[in-house]
């Protein structure tokens, strides 16, 4: 019997050593230590032994059981560790692999220009003001010194919705609305960006919808020289420190006097295709706010004066980036837009 137990033990240990995974190891456990296993069978046969032999054999069976189960435990630990190692190896990530690039969008060139202009004027103490694109005739025309039947209304071909309601032709109604809110008290210092609409045929330089940005300053002792100084700073910041501006007399119903403002060309005055040989590029219109406009907005024109200027965002962007067709801004051609994907 003792011999049989020894054999069982060495058989079991061999199989434990040979077990390649946890399932095989468990099969060995069940086969040798289970209720129907050979060790249990030996215990059952103990009754036939003599009283002297019984304790001796009992101790031996226990030793065999413990040896086998201890060996199984050790093997189990080994197999479990190996399984974890294997799993880790499978799940490992190669951090040296180059990543897949994420396609990033970019700001539209018009947005970039508008933000740049806004930042510049915010830095000079202006605030940004906005207003509705569907506007009342009063704010778009009448309050800007353009009563009904005024011939200058023809300067801006208008999309009318009703006789009193229209798509705004400029961002100037925002100036009127802002002045009204001030109830006759200065100072007012705003920059108004936004979309405007004109009944124009689309071509390389015209669009029925475009974007303007206007500025308005109203206060005591605001002079033409303040306007000129402000626009000089604008031109230098926007186009380069070596740029100059010049003012030419012009006419707008809402300013008096009115001027067209030119910026010196990047060719340095030698003349090129951009300036059509003149050395100057027209960039915006401006002037001193007409007393009628101040009065209609509730300001005392004897006490207050002001200046206003307005420009097309497209025109500024075209000059700044050398774009030759206004339609590029609206057709969403990625080949065009990607050229402005500088990540700031
Ligand atoms: Zn030029």
Image (cartoon, rainbow, N blue to C red):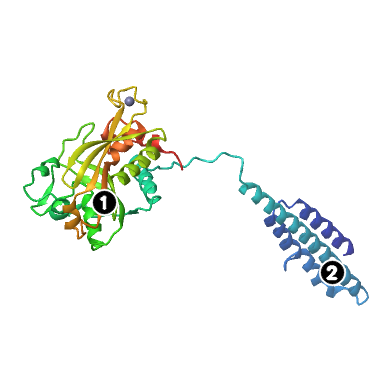
Q: Could you say where residue 65 lies in the image, as x and y percent from the top left?
A: 81, 66
Which of the numbered marks, if any, corresponds to residue 62?
Answer: 2
- Residue 9 seen from this side: yes
Write the residue at 93% across / 75% down: 52
Q: Name the residue under label 1.
A: 306
For the residues labelled 1 and 2, the Cα–Cα distance comes to 108 Å
In this view, 59 is above or below 237 = below
Quadrant location, the N terminus: bottom right
x, y (%) of residue 224? 28, 45
Residue 323: x, y in percent?
32, 31
User: Observer-nearest residue: 49 or 112?
Assistant: 112
- Residue 54 as seen in the image, left or right of residue 262: right
Dot 1 crowding, Cα within 10 Å, few <14, some 14–19, many 20+: many
Mark 1 vs mark 2, foreground winner is 1
Residue located 18% across and 52% down the image: 291
Among numbered discs 1 and 2, the one appearing first in the sequence: 2
Which residue appears at 39% of the width and 48% of the height?
Answer: 119
Q: Say which of 166 and 233 sits in front.
A: 233
Quarter holding ligand 1: top left
Q: Residue furthest right?
A: 52
* Number of residue marks: 2
* Residue 278 position (above or below residue 298): above
Q: Which residue is drawn at 77% across and 55% down?
A: 16
Left or right: where 78 falls relative to 116: right
Which label is found at residue 323? Answer: none
- Asked which quadrant contains residue 331, the reply is top left
């Amino acid at each position: 019997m003792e011999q049989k137990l020894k054999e069982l033990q060495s058989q079991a240990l061999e199989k434990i050593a040979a077990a390649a995974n946890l399932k095989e190891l468990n099969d060995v456990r069940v086969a040798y230590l289970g209720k129907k296993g050979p060790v249990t069978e030996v215990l059952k046969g103990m009754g036939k032994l003599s009283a002297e032999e019984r304790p001796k054999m009992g101790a031996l069976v226990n030793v065999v059981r413990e040896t086998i189960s201890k060996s199984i435990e050790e093997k189990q630990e080994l197999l479990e560790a190996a399984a974890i190692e294997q799993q880790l190896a499978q799940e490992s990530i190669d951090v040296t692999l180059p990543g897949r690039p994420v396609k990033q969008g970019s700001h539209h060139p018009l947005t970039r220009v508008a933000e740049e202009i806004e930042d510049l004027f915010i830095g000079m103490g202006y605030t940004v003001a906005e207003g509705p694109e569907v506007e009342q005739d009063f704010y778009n025309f009448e309050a800007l010194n353009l009563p009904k039947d005024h011939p200058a209304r023809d300067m801006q071909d208008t999309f009318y919705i009703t006789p009193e309601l229209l798509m705004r032709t400029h961002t100037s109604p925002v100036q009127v609305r802002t002045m009204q809110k001030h109830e006759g008290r200065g100072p007012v210092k705003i920059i108004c960006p936004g979309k405007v609409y004109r009944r124009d045929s689309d071509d390389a330089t015209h669009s029925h919808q475009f974007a303007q940005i206007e500025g308005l300053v109203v206060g005591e002792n605001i002079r033409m020289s303040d306007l000129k100084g402000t626009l000089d700073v604008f031109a230098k910041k926007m186009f380069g420190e070596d740029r100059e501006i010049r003012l030419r007399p012009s006419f707008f119903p809402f300013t008096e006097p009115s001027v067209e403002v030119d910026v010196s060309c990047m060719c340095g005055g030698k003349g090129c295709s951009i300036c059509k040989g003149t050395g100057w590029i027209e960039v915006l219109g401006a002037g001193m706010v007409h007393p009628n406009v101040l009065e209609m907005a509730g300001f005392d024109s004897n006490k207050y004066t002001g200046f206003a200027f307005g420009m097309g965002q497209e025109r500024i962007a075209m000059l700044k980036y050398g774009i030759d067709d206004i339609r590029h801004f609206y057709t969403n051609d990625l080949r065009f837009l990607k050229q402005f994907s500088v990540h700031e």
